[in-house]
Image: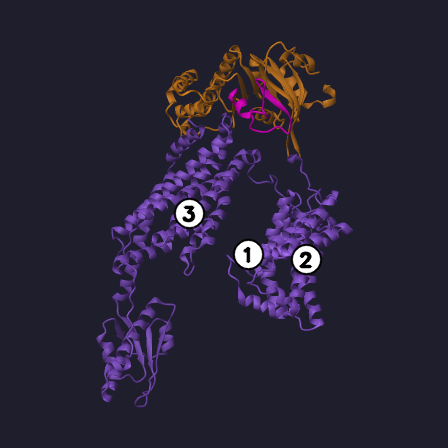
Amino acid sequence: MVSRTVETQTRMIRFSGLTKRYGPLTAVRDLSLSIAEGEVYALLGPNGAGKTTALRCLATLLAPSEGTASVGGIDVRHDPVAVRRKLAFLAASMGLYERLSARELISYFGRLHGVPKHDLRPRVEEMIELFGIGDFADRLCGRLSTGQRQRVSLARALVHDPPALILDEPTLGLDMLSGQTIYDFIATERTRGKAILFSTHQMYEVDLLASRVGVLRGGRLVAEGSPSELVARTGEMNLARAFYHLITQPLEALR
Amino acid sequence: MNVWRVVCAKELRETLRDRRTLLMMVVVPVLLYPVLLIVMEQLFLFGIRNLEAEAARVAVVGEAPAEFLAILEADSAVQVVALDSDPEAAVRSAEVSAVAILNTGPAAEGTREVTLLFNGASDRSMRGQGELRSAVAEWRDSLLAQRLEARALPRSFVRPLAVNDSSIALPEEVGGYALGRFLPLLLVVITLLGAFYPAIDLAAGEKERGTLETLLTAPVPARDIVTGKFVTVALIGITAAALNLTSMILTFQTGALQLTSSIGLVVSLPITSVLVIFLTLVPLAVLFGAIFLGIAVGSSSFKEAQSALTPVYMGVLVPAMLPAFPGIDFGPLLAFLPVAGVSFLFRDLMTGQASFSLGCMVLGSTTIYAALALAFAARAFGSERVLFGGGDEAAEVSREGLWARLFGNKPGADVPVPGQSMMLVALVAVLFFWVGIQMQIRLGEPGVIVSQLAVLLLPALAFVFLGGFDPVRTLSLRRPSANGAVGGLVLILGAMPMVWVLSWLQTFVIPIPWELLEGMQDFITAESGARLAWLLLMLAVTPALCEEMVFRGVLLGGTRSMTPWRMVVLNGLVFGTFHLSTETVIRFLPSAMLGMVVAWAVWRTGSIFVGMLMHLVNNGTIVLVASSTTLRDLFSDAGAPPPLWLLPIAVVLFGSGIHILLRRPVPEEVRRLTLAHET
């Protein structure tokens, strides 16, 4: 039932049979999916379905128990550092150094990502302008509001201009205005040919941005397709109902 | 530019913006200690003056000659009061500070007894006693002078010798000696405190604030992150110690301390000593920084890291304090003891007696320890369980009672977990120390057997049965194969001479407690066959049964989830430590070695009876050798080397034992319990 797109485009992000266990608990079970350049993929699932674990495995923060994942053809098991060079990873849980200013923080991550010294300053200023950080660029991160922090986090994640973006619930806790910044940003990056994988609980975001959707349930990918395909397949009236259907119906009924 | 330098520069910048760290790094070492010292000294001097300001109220009981009363009258420090109550009650109620009780006068040239009644728990009373004592001494001198005059003898008649003390130490050396007593500890503690908070902040603090995940998304190897962080922590530790040392020396040199100037102490350090101290502080700070970082990164919050680091902190204080104890000479053994070596080197540098070779040993060994600690920290940073785990291991709150939680059989587990068996061993060790030794003292020789049965065997069995564990699997109660029994026997026969050589070798660094050895010798020498049988029962059979049940039974059974070599090493160390607690330090290494050998054989064969056999043979052999005069003459001079011709035979036997035991695979049911997440 998983729809397989013909491999015409380059597959920037790929999960191949990835399984992750924590002790007796299996958080992600045999996950396989791929995302092309210029594609926005939304990973849905109830809390505890394994979304964050899957994304963390891709970002090389966790090592897969079985199977693997790759970014730009680089296997996370073989060269995690090279994978991180190709990635921007952003999660709501990620903190900022409170005793650095926004500018210092972006600059620090630029250097960690190996941005050459003469490019660093213009690159940091570019990010500050892009995300509208100018007004608070010299304020310590500990003093920023949630929305301001999220902008700094985006700038931090993208300072090295990577080809693949992973966003774990990027709009969590943000107001409409700040959320809109993220939507605009995702739309722009898509047109620039980035492969974007994000997880969310907001169906509105999925409708707005995603070209494809995967639904995780108990660590398993139970459905995949475009939003309209999922709605059609479940016979529901909208994506939210379709999602509810997919996570509540008995597994056998979905096959 | 190296990535670690980027990390370090950022960490330093952030740390310097943190008030708490700055306080520990600059304010405490520079200001607090000198200020504290001066304040303490002032208080001390103030107290003495206060005490001396008023005259001590004293009383005289008995027939006091006018001469003595005149001496007291002339002394402004005392005020004689009349006493109408019981002298002891008067001193106790502080009505008077001290009382001189004069016995009735002597015959012409006899001795008159004077009792000074005072309260040794009161400063005021002790001062009164002191004043009375000097008054009595003055009176005595005058009586003596009268007697000498009556006989026309010169004063030198009662003073045939005059002793003059003359120390060859220069005032600087005396100062250095005083300084060397406590300054090393202070320097070590300041280095430690300097590294303590940054380490927690840079490791657990990152987790608590959620920045570690952010940092780890950067394409930087864990090694560079650790290096950067750890250089920061070490730099801060070194800076704190350097500032402390500087401010300490300056405080002493300005002469602000009246106490030191009044007793003629001169405190100064040659610049070369100061430089060597700084040089030694570097690996010390590195050591602390790496240990703290490696431990702190396993904790998920500042608070948790603080409690995880506190035992390390305490553990460091003991060796750091050693130079403050009198009579400990600095030698190669201490030079290799972590922290203690540094502390002693500081002392010797301050007293100007440092030796170059010892200094090199301290620097070298501390550098090695620091490198090991660094490897440990790097490993901790590379482990996802450490990075994303942390916090309490059991996320669920147990609803069972305390007893059930301590010893309860968790569903699905039929052997205890390591924590449970370690707890039993700890409990048994404490029981043995409190109860077992008392039994041995009260009951004599039968007490040895009773204590082993009651304090070792009984708790071990109670633990297994009350805890609901599977006795066969926990205690390895399996009949040994012939192969296992022979292998174990050959192995222990080979191990015994090797352990003996080890015991002999360690006497080069550890002093032998001769009295204890001789006492043991007399104790285990048998005159008759019956005596020998009793000794074998008491010293070989009983320990083989009881100690094995605890150490190769419960402890080995409970630690089977560890890797085999860890399990075996831990078993030996615990076994050695147990013997340390009841006897002397020289028992540690031999017992630990034997424990490891026996633990390995029991693990390999799956049968505790192999362990019992080996333990029996080992202890029995010692009893036999000691009890037979011919064998004893051949073997038992503790200071002499063991017959070294035994060594090649022993090595062959040892190797054969291992070979025999390796021929059979480890029984299925005692293989390591592999947990799902460890595959």
For the C terminus of chain B, the quadrant is top right
As shown in the figure, which amino acid type bears the numbered disc 1? Leu
Real-space Cα distance between discs 1 and 3?
Answer: 24 Å
Q: Please, is residue B625 above or below residue B255 in the view?
A: below
Element type at marker 2? helix
- Name of the residue lying farthest toward the front: B645
Residue matched to label 3: B360
Q: Which residue is pictured at 67% across the width and 62% down the height?
A: B621
Chain depicted in orange:
A
What residue lies at 25% left-to-right and 71% top-to-bottom?
Answer: B77
Whichever of labels 2 and 1 marks the residue nearer the N terminus, that label is 1
Same chain shared by disc 1 and disc 3? yes
Q: Which residue is label 2 attached to?
A: B615
Task: Give the Cα distance between marks 2 and 1.
Answer: 22 Å
Quick check: is A79 in the magenta stretch?
yes
Q: What's drawn in magenta, residue-wise?
A: A59-87
Q: Secondary structure at mark 3?
A: helix
Tell me the amino acid under the disc marked 2: His
Residue of label 1: B505
* For marks 1 and 3 on the same chain, the one whose residue lies earlier in the sequence: 3
| Label 3 chain ID | B
Q: Amino acid at mark 3?
A: Cys
Subunit of label 1: B
